[in-house]
Image (cartoon, grey):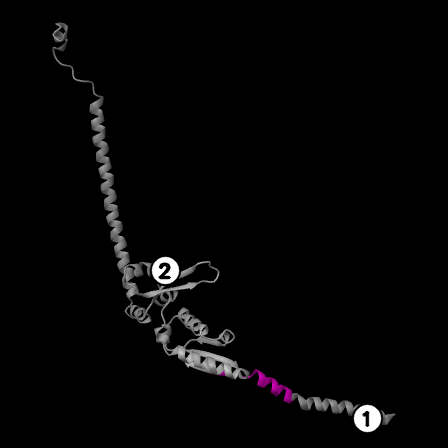
Amino acid sequence: MADKKRDSLRKVLSGIVAAIAGAPDREQGLSTAKASVVAEWPLPPSATLGSALRLKGIEREIRARLPWAVRKFAKAETGRIILRMLKTDADAFQAASATISRTLEGIETLAVLPREAEDILTISARERHKWLKDGRLKSIGTRTVKMRGRSKAVTFHVFDPRHIEDVLDRDLASAWREEDAQEASENRRRGAGKAALTRAGKRQRKARSARTSGKDDAPPPKLEGWDTFEAEGLLR
């Protein structure tokens, strides 16, 4: 009986030892399955122009050229583009890496979108529209896209990144803003002057109208000797 108990205990202990011995192999296989491969590409400041919105725009542009299943693995960070995928997706990783490399070759010439221009130059949408209309901001064309949640497509102007960079470096937005403020002040002054002249003209017309009305209401002048002339019947 004691021998049977010892044999049973020996079997239990042997199973535990076997389980412990096999654990590292399973963990190693699991870590291998979860291991990732990473590729990085530098992203120069001349591409982002210091704008977080521009950085996200570049990320969208890169993802749009990748297969749907791979897009989430590409990410834009400050100063770099990162692609991180599982080792088991080696073929997809290589293909995505090649696509990203081709896209980044001309990324500094990627057109600047309206909201990106506002963020780079620290201007409002109203200022962008005004300066675009009077030619201070120069458009390089339009782009039409179908926005999510909208039934109609939206068309908007896009800008040359080098033109936006020039406006930024020369701080032209501040100069234009000051010019607009001076113009608005001058327009208000002229408007106030015209309003004053209008009010003065109205007062003069009222005064003339009052004088004319007073003359019309006065009794007609009585002619001297008219009663005698009428009594003699000279008009009969």
Coordinates of residue 24 in the picture (x, y in percent): 64, 89
Q: Residues within 10 Å of mark 1 (few under 14, many from 20)?
A: few
Coordinates of residue 135 in the picture (x, y in percent): 27, 61
Secondary element under disc 2, as helix, strand or loop, is helix
In the image, which residues are magenta? Answer: 24-38
* Between discs 2 and 1, the one toward the N terminus: 1
Q: In the rendered structure, which amino acid carries the disc numbered 2? A: Ala
> Quick check: 140 above or below 106?
above
Q: Is residue 147 left or right of residue 172?
A: right
Q: Residues within 10 Å of mark 2 (few under 14, many from 20)?
A: few
Q: Please tell me whether residue 28 belongs to the stretch shown in magenta.
A: yes
List the residue tagged with mark 2.
125
Coordinates of residue 121 in the picture (x, y in percent): 34, 66
List the residue tagged with mark 1.
7
**Which residue is at a point 36% across and 60% down the rendered structure image?**
125
> Quick check: 224 above or below 51?
above
